[in-house]
Image (spheres, helix red, strand yellow):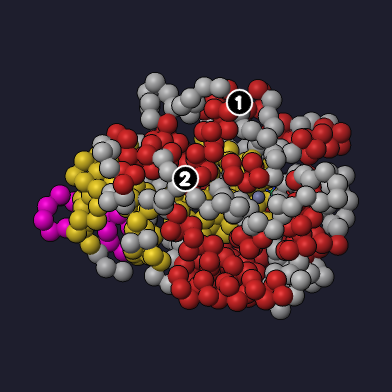
Amino acid sequence: MASSILLADHAWLGRGFADEVALAIEGGVFAAAAAFSDRGERIGRYVVPGVPNLHSHAFQRAMAGLAERRGQSEDSFWTWREVMYAFAGRIGPDELRAIAAQLYVEMLKAGYTHVCEFHYLHHRTDGKPYADPAAMSLALVDAAREAGIGLTLLPTLYMTGGFDGRALGERQRRFGHEVDAYLRLLETLRALESPMLRVGVALHSLRAVPEEAMRVVLENKTVRDGVVHIHIAEQIGEVQDCLAIRKARPVEWLFDHADVDARWCLVHATHLTEEETRRIAESRAVAGLCPTTEANLGDGLFPLKPYLDAGGVIGIGSDSHISVSPVEELRWLEYGQRLVTRHRNVSASATMPSTGETLLAHALAGGAQASGANIGRLDAKHGVAPRADLVVLDDASPLLAGRDVAHAIDTWLFAGNANLVRDVMAGGEWLVRDGRHRDEARIASRYRAVVEALAIAD
Ligand code: NGQ
Ligand code: ZN
C-alpha cells in the first residue's frame, strides 16, 4: 500500500466542495491534510468520497430481469418473492462468490466503495449447515476481497415464516438459525474484522424474528457495540399482519420493544405514520432507502420531506440490484417525491439549495453510519483518519462541459445516463481507472459461466 499525495481541483470536504485539496494517503487511510504543491499527483477536477451502499442481497443480482413477466394471478411483492426463493435455492458458495464478485465490480464502477451485505442464504437447501457453517458468509468475504470493495457483513437471523411464529416454509429452511448457532456464526466472522471488513447484525424482519430471540441477540455482548439492520414496514400487508398479531404497527412495535438508536438501520421503513416518522428521525437511526428496488417491487414511497424536516438520517442501498448505481438511487429518491408532491427540488433546503449535494451528503453520512466503518469522507473527523475511499468524476465528459463546481454534483446525479465515474479507490488501492476495474475481465467471465450453467439447469 503506497503512500501518496493526490491533488484535486475540487474535493468534497464535510458537506461540499473545497478548492485545491491535497489528500495524503498512508496505510490505506487519509492522513492529516497536506499542502497543495507540485509534489502530488493530479487526479482530477472533481473528487468525492466513495459512496456506501447500505443494503445488498448479492445473489439477487443474477436474477435481475427474470421477474418482469406477468404471472397467473396479480403480480406483487409476494409473487416476486416466490420467483426469488426459487432462484435462491440454486445458489451455493461457488455461485455466490462468482455473482457477488461481479456485483461488487459493478458497484465500484458506479461509485460505491463499501457494501452492507444483508445475508441470509446460510445453509444447504434442506436446511442443514455446510461442512463449514460459515461457507456462504465466507464466499461473500472472498468476493469483496477479490473486487476490493469494503464490506459490512450482516449475517441475518431468520427463524419464523410470519408474525404468528409459524415454522419456516420449505424454501425458507436454508435461512434459519437457532439463536446459539447464529451467535456462533457471528463470533467466527467477528474474528476476521479489519478496516475493509466490518461485521454487524441483521434481524431479517419482525416477521422472521420472535420477540424473545430479538431480545437475546440484542443483549449479547458481541452485538452491543455494532450496527443492527432490519427490514421493516416495506409492504402494507406486513403492517396489517403486525397490527393484527402484535397489536401495533411494525415501527411502533419495534420502538416499544428495543432501544432503537444510531446503531440501527431500518431498511425501507416505507409505511409510516407521522408519529413513527418522527420517532425514527429522533432516534438517529438510519432509514435505509432502496428506491429502485422499492419501485420495482411496488412497495410505496417513503415520507422523505417530513422525515428530513425532522432531522432524520437516510442512506441508500441497491438491495435486489435491479439497478446498481448511486445515481439511479438518488435520482429516483428525489423523482418519487416530485411525482407525488408535484414540486421540484424536494430534498434541498434553504441552507443547502443543491438537490444533488444534499442527497449525496445524506448518502455519505447515513451510509457510513449504517456501515459501522470509518468511511464517507475525505477529511478526518474528531482526529480519526477515514479509510481512503474516493471517486474521481470524468471531467472530460460532455455532460460536465460548461459546468462550474456549484453544478457538478447536480449534473452527475441528474443529467443523462453516461457513467461519470472515472477512477475509484478503496482502502488506498486504485480499483477502477478510466472506467475499468483491475480484474473485471476474469470476474465477468467466471460470472458468465456460473449464470449460464444456472440457466441450462432450468
Ligand atoms: C429479501 N427483499 O429478504 O430479499 C427481501 C424479500 C422478504 C426485499 N424486501 C423477502 N426487498 O422480505 O421476506
Ligand atoms: Zn432487503
Please say whether residue 35 is one of the residues in the magenta stretch.
Answer: yes
Locate residue 374, reporting x and y percent. 42, 51
Relative depth, front residue between 260 and 344: 344
Q: Amino acid at mark 1?
A: Val
Count of all numbered marks drawn on residues in the image: 2
Q: Residue at x 75, y 75 (%)?
A: 457
Q: Which mark is residue 327?
A: 2
Q: Which residues are magenta?
A: 23-40
Q: Quadrant of residue 294?
A: top right
Q: Amino acid at mark 2?
A: Val
Q: Residue at x 86, y 47 (%)?
A: 73
Where is 39 relative to 218, above or below? below
Q: Quadrant of residue 288?
A: top right
- Confirm if mark 1 falls within 8 A of ligand 1: no
* Labels 1 and 2: the sequence-earlier one: 2
Where is 313 relative to 5, above or below? above
Please say whether residue 193 is one of the residues in the magenta stretch.
Answer: no
Relative depth, front residue between 317 and 202: 317
Residue for badge 1: 340
Q: Residue at x 45, y 70 (%)?
A: 440
Where is 299 relative to 340, above or below? below
Q: Quadrant of the C terminus?
A: bottom right
Q: Quadrant of residue 336?
A: top right
- Secondary structure at badge 2 equals helix
Q: Residue at x 34, y 47 (%)?
A: 48
Residue 327 left/right relative to 89: left
- Secondary structure at badge 1 equals helix
Answer yes or no: is residue 341 visible. Answer: yes
